[in-house]
Image: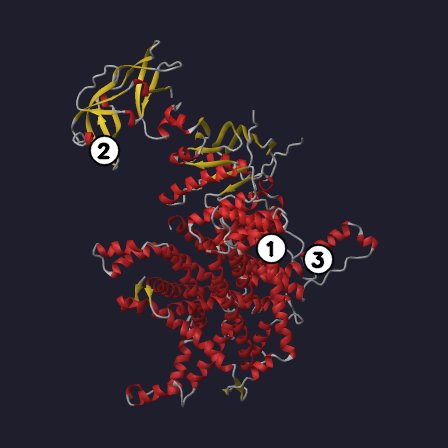
């Protein structure tokens, strides 16, 4: 009788050649287009199909394109500003939902999750409408807030400014870099802080409340307890959340596409306008730079989150 | 968890930043377009909210109904393909040696962090008429002397059609599908599978009678997680679909960017929102029912 | 002679860095209630899962009912298992759980229903047939797992730590229940357990395992009274182990120099030499105020160090010369009343024939 030595246990599916093959093909298909994009950014050929030798000239070309560089700097600036604010707001929200029991809490949780779940385009057009309405409301001299300010200042002569002057000051103030990016940044913060809150709250779920109670029992105040006990514990989550909001902001196209004015371009919006005109190696070069930045941030974020599993 | 009344100062300090920001830059804008969806244009820039349902009824005109229908079926097919690819991948990762799992999972989701626009652009380079895929096909064509037998290779028109949109959607969202599947399959108690085998069921029978039903919550999460953004997707159909593969997201964008018909665009985007809410409600409902049945 | 229902022949199973099962061989007879007993990590569960086909086969042969199981997948083996976690499918009712194994192997539909009813009645779960597992208690879930395995009419039923998840009262009840079921059905049960009481009270024969190897296979009484190694003696019940050196052998027994006892003569069949352990169960020891009158007894004078009170009995720890510590089980009767107090000087004595010589 022929005896088959089975080397696989019944649940050793990971040793199945079919499953390994399937996974391998999936990984290849997942990475091949990106690998090609990166490879051809170094390809000395405009046609982008056949390898004609290594070059970095498209990086130089991208670097010397002032519009592209400006868009890139804008993107990074927005991402940094967004990260700073979103991390603070997101962390506060996480603490709020983690710590307190209050009426309509599940409704609050649901609303906080909305920016994560609704289609981006809905949020994009909503913010577009809001900014345009806000602008015309501000400019409404008879009815808007400038009118009220004007009335107020009329009874205080030293600052006798008319509404048009105030509107001018307002416009000038918000056209100075980086405040001209404020509108986009505010929208980015709105969709990225809920993600920070989710990440930080997941981290907090592993926190033993007895540490906090022990700290208070030993005489620490609310603030001392937060600073010395809670914050160090949730720090990996906060950093991971910060990096997450950074990449979310950097990656966003749709919401920026709808909120950006004609003179404020971000990198994805700029690339979009280039891509519509066709494939070119300098887009590859610029994209490669963005990929590297995002992936580094992501990998750091994942590293930060990893220890939470062993400790928790 | 403590009652909010016990420490009102901390409660408000932690609650207000998020609530206010969300109100200003998310809820008020949404309320504005919701209101606008019941409005009509009175001049080139003025919109009056009149409570009309004309925008919604216009959405159900044949031309837009066709686009909505197409958006739905493209999303359904793309979701199904995503599931068919992501389930074996997630399953394989779950059953691979523990030290490999984090790395494999990272490899699957890493592309998700790369800018959507860049990933879509990368696909264009592969699928365009003079792109990598056609180039490779031509190479094989010539290798098989088909150019001598049949004639020169005719590049395939792979871009700017529904198929390209589906491929793009799958490529872009597949990693997202893996996550919820991985989370549930990993939590699945292996002894259920062993018990099924022990009772005489074949591997396939075990898969369909035990594994799939017990991982249903993850499957549903994954479907909804992927289906909603696909339905409202703007970039992929815009770049890969050309003019004939337009989806609802493109119609919405057009109302705000070119056509300048904001009330109609608002109505369309709120239709999308209603579908989203319905899908989320469905997930919550199924989740609650599953909890009763599965008792994880 | 009847043919063994399960034969384990030179079975070895290695994991990277560990030998889980180390060259194990034994036979299990039809209708036997067989226990694999050992501390966690001794390889008993691995061996059970190898019989079930759930573990990759190592080297050696596993023969069930005359058929070599090599290459036979788990779903084709004539054995069924009750899992430690019960693994009762949460998405099926009790009835469907029990019917599952019949459905998937193509048993005719009109045959399934009566067999399922019968199996459920056997474990007294007939009334709960339409419940889902999350509406059942741990004990009830276990009954379902049992019915689900038994309805397949396996040649051998495998039970992996079946009682470990139950509380003490229920565990005792289920021990009797399992023994009763095995009598009624008349098939072979192989149970894996780390609980010696469970094994002793239920099994006809017990294989004691340690570090992948079988140390001794015997009936409960023999295992308790005549352990063959220090490990088995120590693992089954409590025992006093006294270091000793053999100084000679005679027709009366073995003469040794024991720690704290001096020269003792112990009846022993078989050879003994060098360093040995003298083993004696705590309940064989007698405590007294005065030296024993019979000179034949082994005795030592000591001081009571500690008394642990258990209601019916007390465990008394006595410190003897040379740092020898002896544990003594004392019935809490009237005679013991005044005796058991810390620091009191006492004599410990026992009959030499209650002593075992263990050569490691």
Mark sitting earlier along the chain (3/1): 1
Q: Residue B134 carries which label?
A: 3
- Please name which of the two marks, 1 or 2, marks the residue nearer to the observer: 2
Residue A267 image offset from top left, x and y in percent: 52, 66
- Mark 1, residue position: B85
Label 1, label 2: how many angstroms apart (C-alpha)? 71 Å
Say whether residue C350 is left or right of residue C289.
Answer: right
Q: Residue at x 25, y 54 (%)?
A: A214
Chain letter belonging to callout 3? B
Residue C121 image offset from top left, x and y in percent: 50, 48
Q: Which quadrant holds residue C351?
A: top left
Determine contact: label 3, label 1, CB under 8 Å.
no
- Quadrant, the N terminus of chain A: top right
The secondary element bearing badge 2 is classed as loop
Say whether residue B47 is left or right of residue C67.
Answer: left
The secondary element bearing badge 1 is classed as helix
- Please name which of the two marks, 3 or 1, marks the residue nearer to the observer: 1
The secondary element bearing badge 3 is classed as helix
Camera sees residue A162: no
The answer to whether residue A308 is above or below residue B160 is above
Determine contact: label 2, label 3, CB under 8 Å.
no
């Amino acid at each position: 009788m022929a005896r088959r030595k089975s080397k696989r246990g019944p649940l050793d599916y990971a040793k199945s050649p079919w499953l390994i093959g399937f996974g391998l093909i999936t990984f290849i298909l997942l990475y091949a287009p990106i690998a090609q994009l990166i490879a051809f950014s170094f390809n000395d050929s405009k046609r982008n199909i056949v390898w004609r030798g290594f070059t970095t000239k498209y990086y130089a070309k991208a670097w010397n394109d002032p519009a592209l560089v400006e868009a890139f700097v804008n993107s990074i600036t927005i991402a940094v500003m967004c990260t700073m604010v979103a991390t603070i707001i997101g962390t506060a929200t996480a603490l709020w939902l983690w710590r307190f029991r209050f009426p309509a809490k599940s409704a609050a949780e649901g609303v906080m999750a909305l920016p994560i779940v609704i289609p981006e385009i809905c949020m994009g057009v909503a913010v577009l409408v809001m900014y345009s309405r806000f602008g015309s409301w501000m400019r409404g001299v008879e009815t808007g807030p400038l009118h009220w300010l004007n009335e107020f200042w009329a009874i205080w002569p030293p600052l006798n400014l008319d509404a048009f002057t105030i509107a001018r000051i307002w416009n000038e103030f918000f056209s100075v870099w980086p405040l001209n990016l404020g509108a986009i940044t505010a929208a980015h913060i709105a969709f990225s802080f809920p993600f920070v809150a989710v990440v930080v709250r997941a981290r907090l779920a592993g926190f033993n409340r007895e540490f906090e109670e022990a700290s208070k029992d030993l005489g620490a105040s609310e603030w001392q307890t937060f600073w010395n006990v809670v914050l160090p514990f949730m720090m990996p989550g906060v950093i991971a959340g910060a990096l997450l909001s950074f990449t979310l902001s950097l990656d966003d196209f749709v919401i920026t596409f709808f909120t950006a004015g004609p003179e404020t371009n971000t990198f994805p919006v700029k690339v979009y306008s280039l891509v519509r005109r066709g494939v070119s190696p300098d887009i590859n070069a610029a994209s490669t730079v963005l990929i590297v930045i995002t992936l580094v941030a992501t990998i750091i974020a994942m590293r930060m989150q990893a220890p939470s599993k062993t400790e928790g | 968890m403590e009652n909010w009344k016990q420490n009102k100062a901390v409660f408000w300090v932690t609650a207000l930043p998020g609530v206010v920001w969300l109100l200003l830059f998310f809820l008020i804008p949404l309320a504005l377009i919701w209101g606008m969806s019941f409005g009509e244009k009175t001049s080139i820039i003025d919109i009056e909210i009149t409570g009309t349902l004309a925008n919604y009824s216009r959405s159900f005109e044949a031309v837009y109904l066709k686009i909505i229908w197409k958006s739905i079926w493209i999303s359904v097919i793309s979701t199904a393909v995503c599931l068919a690819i992501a389930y074996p991948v997630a399953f394989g990762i779950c059953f691979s040696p523990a030290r490999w799992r984090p790395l494999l999972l990272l490899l699957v989701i890493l592309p998700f962090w790369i800018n959507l626009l860049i990933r879509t652009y990368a696909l264009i380079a592969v699928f365009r008429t003079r792109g990598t895929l056609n180039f490779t096909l031509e190479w094989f064509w010539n290798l098989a002397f088909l150019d001598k037998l049949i004639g020169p290779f005719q590049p395939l028109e792979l871009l700017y059609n529904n198929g390209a949109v589906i491929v793009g959607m799958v490529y872009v969202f597949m990693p997202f599908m893996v996550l919820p599947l991985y989370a549930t399959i990993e939590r699945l108690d292996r002894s259920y599978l062993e018990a099924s085998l022990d009772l005489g069921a074949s591997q396939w029978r075990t898969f369909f009678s035990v594994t799939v039903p017990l991982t249903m919550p993850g499957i549903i999460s994954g479907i909804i997680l992927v289906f909603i953004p696909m339905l409202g997707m703007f970039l992929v159909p815009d770049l890969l679909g050309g003019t004939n593969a337009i989806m609802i997201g493109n119609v919405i964008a057009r109302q705000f960017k070119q056509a300048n018909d904001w009330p109609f665009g608002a109505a369309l985007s709120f239709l999308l929102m209603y579908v989203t809410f319905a899908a989320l409600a469905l997930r919550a409902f199924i989740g609650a029912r599953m909890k009763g049945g599965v008792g994880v | 002679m009847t043919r063994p229902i399960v034969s384990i022949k030179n079975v070895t199973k290695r994991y990277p860095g560990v030998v889980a099962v180390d060259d194990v061989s034994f036979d299990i007879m039809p209708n036997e209630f067989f226990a694999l007993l050992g501390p966690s990590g001794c390889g008993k569960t691995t061996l059970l899962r190898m019989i079930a086909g759930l573990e990759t086969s190592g080297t050696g042969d596993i023969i069930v009912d005359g058929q070599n199981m090599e290459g036979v997948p788990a779903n084709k083996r004539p054995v069924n298992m009750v899992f430690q976690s019960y693994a009762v499918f949460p998405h099926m009712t009790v009835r469907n759980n029990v019917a599952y194994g019949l459905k998937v192997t193509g048993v005719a539909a009109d045959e399934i229903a009566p067999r399922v009813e019968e199996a459920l009645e056997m474990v007294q779960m007939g009334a709960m047939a339409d419940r889902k597992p999350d509406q059942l208690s741990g004990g009830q879930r276990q009954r379902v797992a049992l019915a689900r395995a038994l309805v397949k009419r396996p040649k051998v039923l495998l039970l992996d730590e079946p009682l470990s998840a139950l509380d003490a009262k229920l565990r005792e009840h289920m021990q009797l229940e399992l023994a009763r079921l095995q009598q009624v059905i008349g098939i072979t049960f192989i149970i894996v357990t780390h609980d010696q009481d469970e094994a002793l009270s239920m099994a006809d024969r017990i294989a004691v395992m340690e570090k992948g190897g079988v140390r001794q296979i015997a009936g409960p009484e023999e295992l308790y009274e005549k352990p063959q190694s220090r490990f088995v003696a120590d693992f089954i019940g409590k025992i006093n182990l006294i270091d000793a050196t053999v100084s000679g052998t005679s027709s009366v027994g073995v003469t040794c120099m024991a720690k704290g006892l001096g020269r003792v003569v112990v009846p022993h069949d078989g050879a003994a030499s060098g360093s040995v352990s003298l083993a004696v169960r705590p309940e064989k020891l007698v405590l007294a105020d005065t030296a024993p009158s019979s000179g034949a007894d082994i005795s030592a004078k000591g001081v009571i160090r500690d008394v642990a009170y258990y209601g019916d009995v007390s465990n008394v720890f006595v410190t003897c010369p040379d740092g020898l510590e002896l544990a003594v089980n004392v019935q809490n009767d009237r005679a013991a009343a005044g005796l058991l107090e810390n620091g009191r000087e006492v004599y410990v004595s026992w009959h030499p024939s209650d002593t075992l010589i263990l050569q490691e």
